[in-house]
Amino acid sequence: MTTFMTTDKGYRKILENKLHDSYIHKHLSYPVIDEEKWNLLLFLVEQHKSLSPLQREKYIISTMLVQIALDTHDFVPIKQNADTESEMIEKQLQVLSGDYYSGLYYLLLAEAGEIQFIQILANAIREINELKVTLYYEDQLPLETWLNLKMKLNASLLVHVAKYLHEPNLEPIIQNWLMYRRLDTEEAIYGYSLLRTEWEARNNKAASIPLIDEKLIRDYEKAVYRAISQLPASSMFIEQFIYSQETNERRTSRL
């Protein structure tokens, strides 16, 4: 019987081979795989029992290529002019590498004849770009609205995949779960959320952030379990994933 660890290693090796480009990695850091999204993606695809092994591989690898392409573009500095020639080259390579990863997903699915899944990922990319435009140009957003847009942006790709493979009612669970894990992880590593820094930079430290704190993190966590409690029996498999990601200590503290 194939274990999750064996499956994870197998898919990860395929992804790493796809990502390898000696010229890009000579100048840029190797792209980071978002482990929370990777684990959730593997689970969502593996739970769809009617997919062939080849379809599972194509869906997982292509989706993560899109995620990495989006993340790579997010690392490109917003400022128009680079300070040095090396900065300018790095910025250009960052953009091109993101385009390269995005092109790989399209090629991978087109070769497999997965036109419908290409459309699913394209719709997700369009929604993500629309959310980014709103966040960039709407500079008077209330904190609650801003956080809601960031939550949707963070989860959009996997929400589109989950809706295609399963049911629409998984959306609030995926959104709140990924937001909760992001904030909780950043709090553990840095002592604060990077969203707090981003909000303060956006608002010149105006609406100071006792609002992005431990209570907010727990609110997202509670929202996950509220959404799970409202699921029909056909969607309860997602509860298995959520519990598998928790430590005994975290589970006890929530009760």
Image (cartoon, helix red, strand yellow):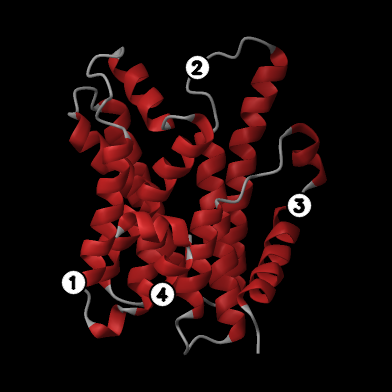
Which residue is found at the position 50% from the left and 45% from the top? Answer: 70
Question: What SS does tag 4 mark?
Answer: helix
What's the residue type where badge 3 is placed?
Answer: His
Any mark on residue 87, and which?
none
What's the residue type where badge 4 is placed?
Answer: Gln
Query: Crowding at label 3, few (<14), some or many (≥20) Cα neighbours within 10 Å?
Result: few
Residue assigned mark 4: 240
Residue assigned mark 1: 230
* 11 or 18, nearer to the observer: 11
Q: Measure the alpha-carbon separation of dots 4 and 1.
A: 15 Å
What's the residue type where badge 1 is placed?
Answer: Gln
| Quadrant hosting residue 235 | bottom left
* 103 or 162, nearer to the observer: 162
* Mark closest to the chain's N terminus, 3 or 1: 3
* Mark closest to the chain's N terminus, 1 or 2: 2
Residue assigned mark 3: 20
Residue 54 x/y as whole percent = 61, 81
Question: What SS does tag 3 mark?
Answer: loop
Q: Measure the alpha-carbon separation of dots 3 and 1.
A: 43 Å
